[in-house]
Image: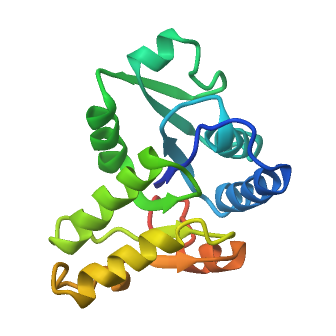
Amino acid sequence: MPHLAVFASSSQGLPAELLEQIDRLTFALARSGWDLVYGGANVGLMNVTASAFRRAGREVVSVIPSIFDRRGLTFGDSTTVIRTDDLRERKRIMAEQAAAFLALPGGPGTADEFIEILTAKLVGMSEAPLVLYDPGGQWRHLIALLEDMERNGFAYREPRSRFVHARSIEAVLDALPVAGRDGSL
């Protein structure tokens, strides 16, 4: 089955409304045929995402740096756990396994993961779908930065055209192809 790489916050104490929204979204993605590859943590939106995929009976591949695994932060119901030496190796493995990418609200790590995939798309190293889920406008400054880079000639390949900026669950579901039983998109 095709894997959807999900980048998301590991922060705790996020609003209950956001947690519920991410649960609904990721459960719907799992029900549409996707398996999950993600950063492997059992906290924050990462935990909500992995739990939703497992509840839907889908595979969850947790790719987690050993330092976090040793701290007990690995999602306990993973179908596969891949321990890495560092964050770079984690991103590489996730990218290799993914047929599409979804960035949820998050912090610097989530932004870094999104930008890396966007850059790969800009230089022709990836054609995989990339969606930035932005229900509350958290990513507005990142969007403005990308638009400013393009406007000032620093990003000549139209970065905004290389991903979907989705503000609703429906927009995410429309942007990501339904995964077929044979692994096709």
Front-lying residue, 148 or 41: 148
Q: Quadrant of residue 145?
A: bottom left
Q: Looking at the picture, does residue 92 appear above or below residue 120?
A: above
Front-lying residue, 12 or 100: 12
Q: Looking at the picture, does residue 23 appear above or below residue 83?
A: below
Task: Residue 56 in the image: state x and y as whole percent.
Answer: 74, 47
Residue placed furthest toward the bottom: 151
Q: Quadrant of residue 55?
A: top right
Front-lying residue, 136 or 64: 136
- Is residue 84 at least partly visible in the picture? yes
Q: Looking at the picture, does residue 117 appear above or below residue 78?
A: below
On the picture, is 101 further left or further right than 171? left
Task: Residue 150 in the image: state x and y as whole percent.
Answer: 25, 85
Residue occupying the point 30% across, 26% down:
86
On the picture, is 79 further left or further right than 77? left
On the picture, is 180 further left or further right than 29? left
